[in-house]
Image (tube, rainbow, N blue to C red):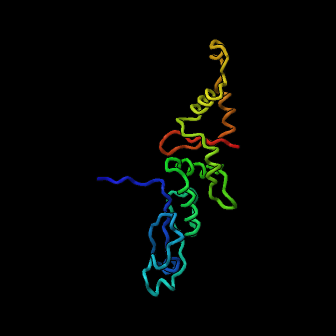
Amino acid sequence: MKTAIDTHTPRAWIGCLACYNEGRLVGEWFDAITADEVTPETLHGESAVAEAHDELWVMDHENIPVSGEMSPEEAAAWGRAFADVDEYHRAAVFAWVQSGDYIAEGTGDLPSIPDFEERYCGQWSDFDEYARNLADEIGLLDGIPEEIERYFDWDPWIRDLHFDYTECDDPEGGVFVFRIM
């Protein structure tokens, strides 16, 4: 029986810096949310090596939308930020952060989940589908006779509307749409 691959849980590969500097790669994968709980003893067991090799570092990570290495504490903060997000919206938050057009919480790079929830407009096949749905919701053409409505030029209206939104590709197809405020 095949097991599903988790593509949304942030994970961190935490390694021992002293071992790395000695030319040995010693480390393991952990869920990012617990990265700040990993100790040298977790990697080395109870030994003299664990006492001498007390500096740990995240040398690789998955499902954290920033590049480069980081501290275990930073990885744990990313893990906690994503734990606050519904599993079905994690890919959208990931895309929002990677777009660079996201709102950070406090002084760091972590996304503000309340701001995400306020700005997220959903997953759509394309921006045109979102725009036409929005036009229906706001009653853009309500009260206009059908004979005149068919002459409405959607292209410039959708193009202008797009200036108020960020559109990010959904890896599974379609796009995520975010309102710029």
The count of marks equals: 0
In the image, what residue occupies the spot 44% across and 85% down? 47
Where residue 136 sits, quadrant-wise, is: top right
Q: Locate residue 23, reporting x and y percent.
A: 47, 78
Farthest bottom residue in view? 48
Residue at x-position 68% and y-position 33%: 161
Which percent across, then down, holds residue 16?
50, 76
Q: Is residue 90 above or below residue 177?
A: below
**97 sits left or right of 173 in the view:** right
Residue 123 at x, y percent in the picture: 54, 40
Q: Residue furthest left?
A: 1
Q: How far from the left and from the top, in percent, is residue 29?
A: 45, 67
Using the image, determine if residue 119 lies above or below residue 41.
above
Q: Residue 152 occupies which quadrant of the picture?
A: top right
* Nearer the observer, 72 or 66: 72
Q: Residue 168 or 6: which is nearer the viewer?
A: 6
**Residue at image x 47%, y 63%?**
31
Q: Please identify the quadrant where the C terminus is shown.
A: top right
